[in-house]
Image: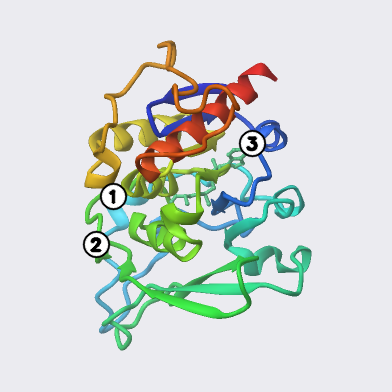
């Protein structure tokens, strides 16, 4: 596993997340939000869609997306056990491996058809995530049917791509910047979790095994430099992986942990940097 990219908020590792997971803190403020390879053997060649009378969905995406290759790991059953030790956990695609999840917990529903419920559509109407945060069922409505999208129109990066808006909703449901100091996505794909954390000003760590997607993530992160005012507060510009970053600010010296912060973003950043140091120290 190699550090592929780092800036003031986000670290991205290239490699197998099984090497990263044991090094991460188990703190209650750590949210693991991920969409692992489901083991669904999803067919990603859009040429499988055939025109049907009266159906308008079939033509648009066929030529653009047909070259996609299946996601790494999608061919075998997924075992979520290594993730279950985290206290804040949201797992997309959970129906595929529900047999390995605790019976308690809640479910998040992403309704992908918002406003187009009557339109014939060959794929799922919704996706489900299991969470250990509460026991209720909560729904996010965000249209995402092939190229008919409520957001990120024309930005097709990954066959299992999630909207950044969905991941932002998840982080806010998990407590947002007030309760979450670090967001982790061990199966980052095209990076929507990392982008959502970036937008909310929360430090994030991602891991992706496929180099091409690592580069997609970096490109997307660099295009969206800290848009929210809270995140911009005192945020230094991006650093290269090799740059020296002050690991603990003067306010944390003495006791070795944050005591009083001018802003939440400052506190979160210090927490992120101190956990990064611990990982580097082994
Ligand atoms: C379902 S996709 C995630 C898609 C992501 N939610 C998005 O919106 O782009 C799962 C990702 O996990 C990656 N992956 C599979 N096994 C992995 C492993 N052991 N460590 C890190 N990444 C892995 C795959 O390359 C794939 O990009």
The residue carrying pointer 2 sits among few (fewer than 14), some (14 to 19) or many (20 or more) residues within 10 Å by Cα, namely: few
Given residues 136 and 43, the one toward you in this image is 136
Q: Which mark sits nearer the N-terminus, 3 or 2? A: 3
| Colouring chosen for the image of the structure | rainbow
Q: Which mark sits nearer the N-terminus, 1 or 3? A: 3
- Of discs 1 and 3, which sits in the foreground? 3
Residue behind mark 1: 64
Ligand 1 within 8 Å of the CB at mark 3: yes
Q: Residue at x 37, y 16 (%)?
A: 240
Q: Residue lying furthest bottom in this view?
A: 118
How many badges with numbers are in the image?
A: 3
Give the image location of residue 142, x and y in percent.
33, 71
Q: Residue at x 27, y 46 (%)?
A: 230
Give the image location of residue 274, x and y in percent.
55, 28
Give the image location of residue 36, x and y in percent.
59, 51
Identify whether 10 is placed above or below 132: above
The residue carrying pointer 3 sits among few (fewer than 14), some (14 to 19) or many (20 or more) residues within 10 Å by Cα, namely: some
Under tag 2, what secondary structure?
A: loop
Residue 60 numbered tag: 2
Quadrant containing ligand 1 reads top right
Residue behind mark 3: 17
Q: Residue at x 44, y 17 (%)?
A: 246
Identify whether 165 is placed above or below 137: above
Q: Are marks 1 and 2 in contact (CB under 8 Å)?
A: yes
How far separated are the C-alphas under marks 1 and 3?
Answer: 30 Å
Q: Are marks 1 and 3 in contact (CB under 8 Å)?
A: no
Under tag 3, what secondary structure?
A: helix
Identify whether 56 is placed above or below 222: below
Under tag 1, what secondary structure?
A: helix
Give the image location of residue 224, x and y in percent.
25, 39
Q: Is residue 104 left or right of residue 238?
A: right
């Amino acid at each position: 596993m190699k550090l592929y990219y780092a800036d003031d908020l986000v670290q991205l590792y290239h490699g197998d997340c099984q090497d990263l997971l044991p090094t991460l803190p188990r703190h209650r403020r750590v949210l693991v939000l991920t969409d692992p390879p489901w083991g669904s053997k999803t067919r990603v060649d859009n040429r499988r869609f055939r025109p049907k009378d009266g159906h308008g969905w079939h033509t648009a995406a066929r030529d653009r997306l047909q070259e996609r290759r299946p996601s790494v790991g999608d061919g075998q059953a997924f075992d979520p056990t290594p993730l279950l030790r985290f206290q804040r956990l949201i797992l997309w695609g959970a129906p595929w491996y529900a047999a390995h999840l605790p019976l308690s917990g809640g479910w998040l529903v992403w309704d992908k058809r918002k406003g187009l419920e009557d339109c014939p559509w060959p794929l799922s109407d919704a996706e489900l995530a299991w969470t250990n945060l509460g026991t209720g069922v909560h729904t996010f409505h965000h249209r995402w049917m092939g190229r008919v999208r409520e957001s990120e129109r024309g930005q097709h990066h990954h066959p299992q791509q999630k909207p950044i808006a969905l991941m932002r909703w998840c982080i806010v449901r998990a407590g947002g910047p007030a309760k979450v100091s670090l967001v982790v996505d061990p199966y980052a794909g095209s990076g929507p979790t990392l982008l959502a954390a970036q937008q909310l000003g929360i430090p994030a760590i991602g891991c992706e095994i496929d180099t091409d997607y690592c580069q997609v993530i970096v490109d997307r992160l660099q295009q969206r430099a800290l848009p929210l005012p809270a995140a911009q507060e005192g945020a230094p510009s991006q650093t290269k992986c090799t740059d020296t970053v002050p690991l603990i600010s003067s306010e944390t010296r003495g006791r070795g942990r944050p005591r009083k912060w001018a802003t939440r973003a400052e506190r979160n950043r210090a927490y992120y940097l101190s956990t990064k140091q611990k990982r580097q120290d082994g």
